Image: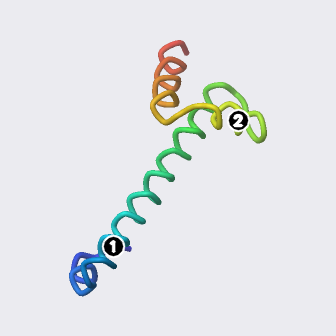
Amino acid sequence: MLIKAHLLNLDSDTRAFTLVGAFMGYFALLEVGINEAIGQVMGVQGARLAIVCRNMGFDDKVKTLRALVDFS
């Protein structure tokens, strides 16, 4: 967990790498959640879902999910 007091105790380079790594990790979790939502709306899972989501960028995934939700 990122705690401000702990981050302030780190040297600036380590703090920067820690914050960038945390951002990347949380962004990956967001993307997994969007992938799962697309799978639920489309009714696909497993390898099919991986194939569908793998070939889309993040922006395309968000637009696709919006369109699928609007359609349903």
Quadrant containing the N terminus is bottom left
Q: Residue furthest front?
A: 13
Q: Nearer the viewer, residue 63 or 69?
A: 63
Left or right: 71 with respect to 42? left
Q: Which mark is residue 60?
A: none
Relative to 69, is 1 above or below? Answer: below
**Label whose residue precedes the other's in the sequence (2 or 1):** 1
Q: Is residue 71 above or below residue 47?
A: above
Q: Picture quarter containing residue 59?
A: top left
Q: Inspect the image, locate mark 1, and give the three-letter code of the amino acid beneath it.
A: Leu
For the C terminus, which image quadrant? top right
Which element type, helix, strand or loop, lies under badge 2? helix
Please identify the residue farthest to the bottom as the structure is shown: 9
Q: Nearer the viewer, residue 14 or 2?
A: 14
**Dot 2 alpha-carbon crowd within 10 angstroms: few under 14, some 14 to 19, many 20 or more:** some
Can you tell which quarter of the image residue 11 is in?
A: bottom left
In the rendered view, would you say 55 is above or below 27?
Answer: above
Cα distance in 3D space between marks 2 and 1: 32 Å
**Residue visible at 72% across and 34% down?**
51
Q: Which residue is mark 1?
A: 2
Estimate the x, y position of residue 18 in percent, counting from the top left: 37, 72
Helix, strand or loop under label 1: loop
Figure quadrant of residue 39:
top right
Q: Which mark is residue 49?
A: 2
Q: Position of residue 29 (x, y in %)?
A: 50, 53
User: Which residue ends up furthest to the top in the rendered image?
Assistant: 71
Q: Could you tell me the amino acid type at mark 2?
A: Leu
